[in-house]
Amino acid sequence: MPVHTLDDLQSYLDHARRKVLGLADRVPRELWRWRPAPDRWSVLDNLEHLVLTERFCGDLLERMLERARREGRMSRGLPIRWVDARPVMLDAEGKTYTAPVWAEPRGRWDEQEVAEELAASRQRLEAILRDLPRYDVERVIEPHPLYGWPFNAAQWVHFVGLHENVHARQLERIARPWAEAGPGQRDRPAR
């Protein structure tokens, strides 16, 4: 899905979230803690990690926009051209990354609570996205703290959606056994 404008960003975030939740819902909720292997994350682990990452990005974006206000980097009325984060992340393709300690799942929430936390973190990010046109977002840059990718404020929002799609692929692998299970076998993965 191409991302060229802030409106595209909203659509991209919506699409990524629907995909994640749809894949999670393929797995019975009572099995959201099931891990396909000891070193793999469960559905609940993936969702918790997404909340933590989105919260981190929300905190970072709020600091970036506060800095922009202090420095007078308000919108000049020009269209925002640099929205897509992928060109900045060229070295990321095909690599596997380890979550930083602060973003590791720790069983903070149950199935209902994680759904509420996902909704709250997304609501906050969408409020930030609605506020971006007030700023010269292309000149408000903050590198990724672990990988150094120099994202502007719009690209940070796109990164959240890209990151969510990475975890959608993990959820797809987790959900696959239930999709392959026959009727009456939803309580256990197919082997």
Image: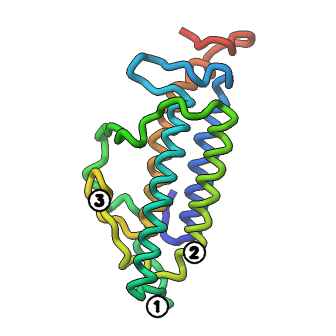
Q: Circle 1 is placed at which residue position?
A: 76
Q: Is residue 72 above or below residue 114?
A: below
Q: Quarter-wise, where is residue 26 in the image? A: top right
Cα distance in 3D space between marks 1 and 3: 25 Å
Give the structural element (helix, strand or loop) at label 2. Answer: helix
Cα distance in 3D space between marks 2 and 1: 14 Å
Give the structural element (helix, strand or loop) at label 3. Answer: loop
Task: State the residue in front, 51 or 75.
Answer: 51
Q: Circle 2 is placed at which residue position?
A: 131
Q: Could you classify mark 3 by the number of other residues whose Cα lies within 10 Å: few (under 14), some (14-19), or many (20 or more)?
A: many
Task: State the residue in front, 164 or 177.
Answer: 164
Q: From the viewer's perspective, is the residue at label 3 or at label 2 nearer?
A: 2
Q: Is residue 182 above or below residue 93?
A: above
The residue shown at (30%, 41%) is 94
Task: State the residue in front, 87 or 25.
Answer: 25
Q: Is residue 87 left or right of residue 180?
A: left
Q: Is residue 74 above or below residue 173?
A: below
Q: Quarter-wise, where is residue 145 in the image? A: bottom left
x, y percent for residue 16: 56, 49
Q: Circle 3 is placed at which residue position?
A: 149
